[in-house]
Each structure stands twice: as structure tokens, then as C-alpha cells.
Image: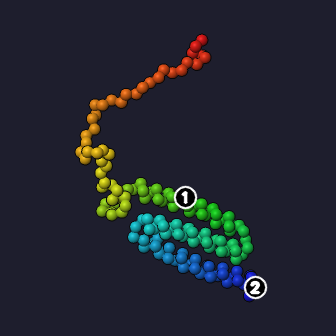
């Protein structure tokens, strides 16, 4: 077998695997039960498209596809970050049992040796101030 034949067969196998990945990720975008599932599926679609472009670049020998894949990777990353910020800005859904919902139920207690120690509100902080140093301009 020649090296060109090995590259051609490998590229064909990679395209089949990427096509299956594309179909599974598309199914998750359509059916995905939650919004984060859909966002991850869109990120997977972006990575799969980058893979397609890389395999096509190797198969055809046209290097411009690599530049397109790099720019698609940057756009895909920015889109994933924007979607993640959107999901976080919405806050936890009512009745959700995720890690964010579990953290909101915790109460913060002051660190002290006594369990129910009260902090005096009338205590004032004493700040020691020193006079400012005079410069040559202030001395004249």
C-alpha cells in the first residue's frame, strides 16, 4: 500500500466517524432535555465541523481549509462562552436540584468560639493616622 492510499482510506474513515458524531450531536440539539445539553451539543457540532474541515484539508491538500477551521474554532469558543454566561444569568430554575441550588440554601455563620455570639455594632475602629510628608513645593 502506498502512503497516499493510506491517507485516503484514513480520511474516508475519519469522515464517516465525523458524520456519525454530527448526527448524534444534531439529535441532542433537537431533543436535548435542558438548555445546557443543547449548548454542549452545539459546541460538539462546532468541533465536528472543525474536524470535517481538517480532514478535507488533508484529503485535498488545500491549506486554506485549516485557516477556516481555526477561525471557526475561535467563533465556536466565543459562542459557547456567551451561551454559558446566558445560562448563568438566568439563575437556577425552580425545583432544580443542581449544585447551584444546593449552595443557595446554606447559611453563613460568623466564625467564633461561641455558637451564638453577637457582634457589637457600636464598636468603632480606631485608625491611627500620620501626618502627610511635606514636599519641597510645600516647604517654600
Q: Residue drawn at (60%, 16%), measured in percent from left and top?
A: 137
Most distant residue in the front direction = 113
Most distant residue in the top direction = 140
Query: Which quadrant does the C terminus fall into?
Result: top right
Q: Which residue is mark 1?
A: 78
Mark 2 or mark 1, whichever is nearer to me: 2
- Which badge, 2 or 1, is on the more N-terminal residue? 2
Q: Secondary structure at mark 1?
A: helix
Q: Residue drawn at (61%, 64%), measured in percent from left and top?
A: 72
Task: Determine the image quadrant of residue 32.
Answer: bottom left
Q: Which residue is mark 2?
A: 2
Relative to 60, 105 lies left or right: left
Q: Position of residue 16 (x, y in %)?
A: 59, 81
Q: Position of residue 38 (x, y in %)?
A: 45, 67
Residue 138 visible in the displayed image = yes
Q: Position of residue 97 (x, y in %)?
A: 33, 63
For mark 2, does the 10 Å Cα neighbourhood hold few (<14), some (14 to 19), or many (20 or more) residues? few
- Which residue is at the front of the view, 134 or 94? 134
Measured Cα–Cα span from mark 2 to mark 1: 41 Å
Relative to 16, 30 lies left or right: left
Q: Is residue 139 above or below residue 114?
A: above
Q: Secondary structure at mark 2?
A: loop
Relative to 42, 120 lies left or right: left
Most distant residue in the bottom direction = 1
* Rendered image: mark on residue 52: none
- Which residue is at the front of the view, 24 or 103? 103
Q: Residue drawn at (74%, 82%), measured in percent from left and top?
A: 3
Please tell me how many numbered marks the rendered image carries: 2
Amino acid at each position: 500500500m502506498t502512503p497516499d492510499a493510506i491517507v485516503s482510506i484514513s480520511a474516508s474513515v475519519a469522515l464517516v466517524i465525523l458524520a456519525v458524531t454530527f448526527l448524534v450531536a444534531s439529535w441532542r440539539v433537537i431533543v436535548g432535555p435542558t438548555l445546557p445539553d443543547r449548548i454542549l451539543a452545539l459546541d460538539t457540532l462546532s468541533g465536528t465541523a472543525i474536524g470535517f474541515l481538517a480532514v478535507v484539508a488533508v484529503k485535498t491538500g488545500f491549506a486554506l481549509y485549516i485557516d477556516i477551521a481555526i477561525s471557526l474554532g475561535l467563533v465556536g469558543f466565543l459562542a459557547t462562552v456567551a451561551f454559558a454566561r446566558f445560562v448563568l444569568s438566568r439563575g437556577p430554575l425552580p425545583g432544580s436540584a443542581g449544585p447551584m441550588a444546593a449552595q443557595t440554601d446554606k447559611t453563613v455563620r460568623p466564625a467564633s468560639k461561641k455558637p451564638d455570639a453577637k457582634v457589637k455594632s457600636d464598636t468603632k475602629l480606631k485608625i491611627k493616622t500620620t501626618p502627610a510628608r511635606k514636599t519641597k513645593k510645600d516647604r517654600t
